[in-house]
Image (cartoon, rainbow, N blue to C red):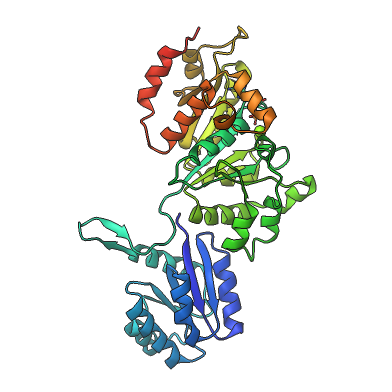
Amino acid sequence: MDVQRIAIVDPSDVTREPLRNLLLGIESVWLEAECSRYEFFIDVARQSVPDLVVIALDADHSKAMQLIQQLTMEFVGLPILAVSSRGDGQSILQALRAGAKEFLTAPVVLEELLLALNRLRSSRLSVSADGTVVSSGGGPRADSVVISVIGSRGGVGSTGLAVNLGCNLAQDQNNSVALVDLDLALGDADVALDLIPDYTLADVALNIERLDMTFLKRSLCKHDTGLSVLPHPVQLEDISLIHEEHLGRLIGLLRASYTHLVFDLSKRFTPTDMTAMRMSDSILLVAQLELTSLRNVVRMLHTLSQDGDLADKVKVIMNRVGSDDGGEITLAKAEETIGRPVYWQIPNDFKAMVGSRNAGVPLLTHAPKSKAQAAIMGLANALSGKSAPEAPKKERRSFFSFK
Ligand SMILES: Nc1ncnc2c1ncn2[C@@H]1O[C@H](COP(=O)(O)OP(=O)(O)O)[C@@H](O)[C@H]1O
Ligand SMILES: [Mg+2]
C-alpha cells in the first residue's frame, strides 16, 4: 500500500499528542510535518508538500477556517481532514464549506481515522487530459515491488540470490533498491557485500516511534552498486527488539522511498518472516535439485497455502542447476514433485559464486560475464516486468542439459 504523507496542525499539545501517536501507529502513514501554529502552517505545507493535511479546529475555530480556505485555494485538490470535539452539524458544515473533505470528532478513534484516510486516498485520484486516471501530486512512488527470498534449507543460495538480485535491480537508474536482512540471527548479507554497518534493524526498531525519513535513510548502508542495505542486528540479544509490528511499519515506510525492496529471510517462519512474506508481491523460494530441498518446498508451500494467498505468490527458483555431483534430480521430476513449474533457474557456478562471496563483491563486479550473473540479471528483469518469463524459459531448457 502506498504511504500517505501527512502534515498536521494543532496548537494544543493536549490534543495533538494523541492524534500524532495515532497517526504514527498506522503503517501506511508517513508523518511529514507537525505544526502548532495556524499562521505557520501554510509555509509548512509549501515546504513539505504533503498528500493530506489534518487540521484541528478547536484551538481557534475562525483561524482554522481561514487556513482551510487558504489551503484549498493554494493547493487545489489537497485533501483536508478537519478534527474537532464539537461534532455539531454547524461546525461540520462550516469546515466542509471552507474546503475540508472529511470531518472527524475528537478524540479520534483509530478505525474512523483509517476509514477517513482511505476515502481521502481514493479521492486523490483524478482524471488527466487524455482521460486516464492518474494520482495527483508528486507523492510517494506508486507501486514498489516487494520481493522476499527464502531458502528451502540452509546453504541453498538464498542470500547469494537476494544480494545479487538487489545489486542487479539497482543497476537501472530508474530504480532505488533496498535489501533488508531479515535472517536476524545468522544473516550475512552485510558480509556478502563487505559492508560495515553503522546502524542495523535493531536501531530502527528502537527508534520506530520517532522514525522519520532522515533517520531511516541514514540507517541504510549504501553499497557501490547503488543498493541500500539494512543489516541484521549485530548482537544476538537485540533480535528480541524487532517485532513484526515494527517490520510492518518499516516496510510501509520503505515502500514510500524505494521502488524495490528485497528481503533475505530466515528459514524458520518467524513472525517477522511471515510479516515480510505477507507484505511481499513475490516470494522467491530457493531450491536445489535434491530431495531434502524439494521435500521442504512441498512442506513450505503447504504451510504458506494455509496463510491466505501466500502460496500463490511463491516463485520457485532452482539454484545450482547442472551441478556435476551426479545425483541431481531432473527438472521434470522436480516440477512433478512440487506440483508447480519452476519459475527460474540459476546454473551451478561455483567459481563465480563462491569467489564473489569470499571477495565480498557482487557477481556483477566480480564475475560480470558468468552464467550465474546472467541468470540473476534475467530474473531481475523478469521480476521488473522487463521480459516475459515464458520466452527465456524455453531457451534455457535447451541450453542446459538435464538428465
Ligand atoms: N548457483 C550457485 N553455484 C555455486 N555455488 C553457489 C550458488 N549459489 C550459492 N552458492 C554457494 O552456496 C553457499 C551458500 O549460499 P548462501 O547464499 O549463503 O545460502 P543460504 O543463504 O541459503 O544459506 C555459498 O558459498 C554460495 O557461494
Ligand atoms: Mg543466508
Residue at image position (59%, 34%) is 150
| Residue 367 in view | yes
Q: Where is residue 176? Give x, y as percent.
A: 49, 48
Residue 38: horizontal and vertical position, in percent? 48, 86
> Quadrant of the image for the N terminus?
bottom left
Residue 30, image x, y percentages: 52, 64
Compared to 56, does 254 lie above or below?
above
Query: Closest to the observer: 2 or 189?
Result: 189
Quadrant in the rendering for residue 349? top right
User: On the rendered structure, is 131 left or right of 191?
Assistant: left
Q: Is residue 111 above or below residue 151?
A: below
Q: Residue at x 46, y 80 (%)?
A: 43
Residue 359 image-quadrant placement: top right
Q: Residue drawn at (38%, 72%), measured in percent from left and top?
A: 79
Q: Is residue 306 visible?
A: no
Pick whichever, 56 or 340, lies toward us: 56
The quadrant of the rendered image in which ligand 2 is seen is top right
Q: Position of residue 381 (x, y in %)?
A: 42, 34
Could you tell me which residue is drawn at 52 percent across and 86 percent down? 37
Q: Is residue 153 above or below residue 11?
A: above
Question: Going by the picture, which residue comes out furthest to the left?
Answer: 130
Up the image or down, 165 lies above or below 16; here it is above
**Total number of numbered discs in the rendering:** 0
